[in-house]
Amino acid sequence: MLGGKNILLGITGGIAAYKTTFLVRLLIKAGANVKVVLTDSASSFVSPLTLATLSKNPVLTSFVKEEQNSVSWNNHVEMGLWADIMLIAPATANTLSKMAHGTSDNLLLATYLSAKCPVFYAPAMDLDMYKHPSTKLSFSKLDSYGNIMVPATSGELASGLHGEGRMAEPEDIVTFIQAYLSKGLPLSGKKVLITAGPTYEAIDPVRFIGNHSSGLMGYELAKAAANMGAEVTLVSGPSHLTIQHHAIKVINVTSADEMFYAVHDHYKEMDIAIAAAAVADYRPKEIADQKIKKKESQLTIDLVKNKDILFSMGEQKKNQFLVGFALETENEVENAIGKLKKKNLNAIVLNSLNDSGAGFKQTTNKISFIDKNLNIKTFKLKTKAEVALDIMNEIIAKIHA
């Protein structure tokens, strides 16, 4: 949600300013570009050097910057235009009053008045100040300007009192902004389950039966769904891929049995489920306790069928929109439609190993999306990130049809 966003963090002179080092780290971790502007008093509570190091950008404190043999100014208009989001945390009663009344006596306030982006602020002050009529008036005016308050919490205050006025924790501020930005997105409020990657079926402590799936298609689907506002549960078989997103919960599994139980632990509460994993159809009947030594010229392993995860999801389906994948090498459309019907799916994504650039270990894919009414929509070869968006857009269109 915050990936690639330019966030301008304004820090004012309250004791809660010490928490902003953690806040900057969380914003950077979420993928944002962060610049910091301090009021003069804020630098008494938090080090500009620390913030500059964490944000990887110079920290600005005044209108004028003096460099060797030259004097120039920090362009507040330029900073206001740069920002996709402005966040003022902590926001003291003094700064809130100045924001409400258009006072511009420092760089932070001048930048605030120049900002064209959404402005969030996290109040931090003592209990009596927080409840004072003048502070409430500031809140009311800022609300009328379209500014968004990250509500203060109750707790121990710097004065020793206990009550409302404590700045929200950095994690809660980031979550609040992410949740606010997700409002109105097409999958806001939806829960999505996605399976990804291969499964490994053990032969002995060293060897396994597996396949060439990297998991990339499933991971891109998870990112696309989360960026559209969904709360995503990603059940992943063994993969070198990692994913970090506040709206994605990753459950790592190894075998088909583990994936079966992980899926059904969460399936009932889902609105959408996409089975993108390449699950092994069979597993060894018995797993050797020790590594099997090379003795004979031939080795026979008895295999038994794994539980059909997608079939079981189709059997138990109630209100979920269920999507499967079909990777085919012959009679592609016919086989995909057969799977669609047999497993009680709402739609199936067909890709063929006969298409160059599609399938396992590729960064691209070429798919056809087939719905339960047998409408077929074929897409050209694209990156898997683009394919994920196409799939999610088709699902959204079907849900709202």
Image (cartoon, rainbow, N blue to C red):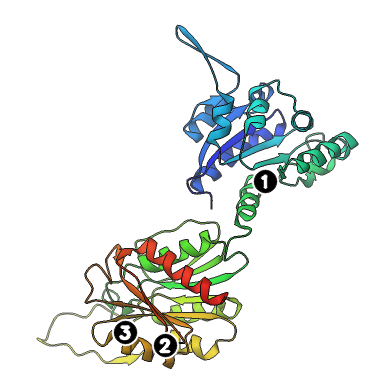
Looking at the image, can residue 286 be seen?
A: no
Identify the residue under disc 1: 169
Q: Is residue 340 left or right of residue 318?
A: left
What kind of residue is marked 3?
Ile
Above or below for 351 versus 373:
above
- Where's the C terminus, which quadrant? bottom right
- Binning the other alpha carbons within 10 Å of mark 3 as few (below 14), some (14 to 19) or many (20 upward) gives some
Identify the residue under disc 2: 340
Q: Which mark is residue 287?
A: 3
Is label 3 or label 1 in front?
1
Q: Secondary structure at mark 3?
A: loop
- Binning the other alpha carbons within 10 Å of mark 1 as few (below 14), some (14 to 19) or many (20 upward) gives some
Above or below for 357 versus 48:
below
Between discs 1 and 2, the one toward the N terminus: 1
Residue 56 image position (x, y, % from top left)? 46, 33
What kind of residue is marked 2?
Leu
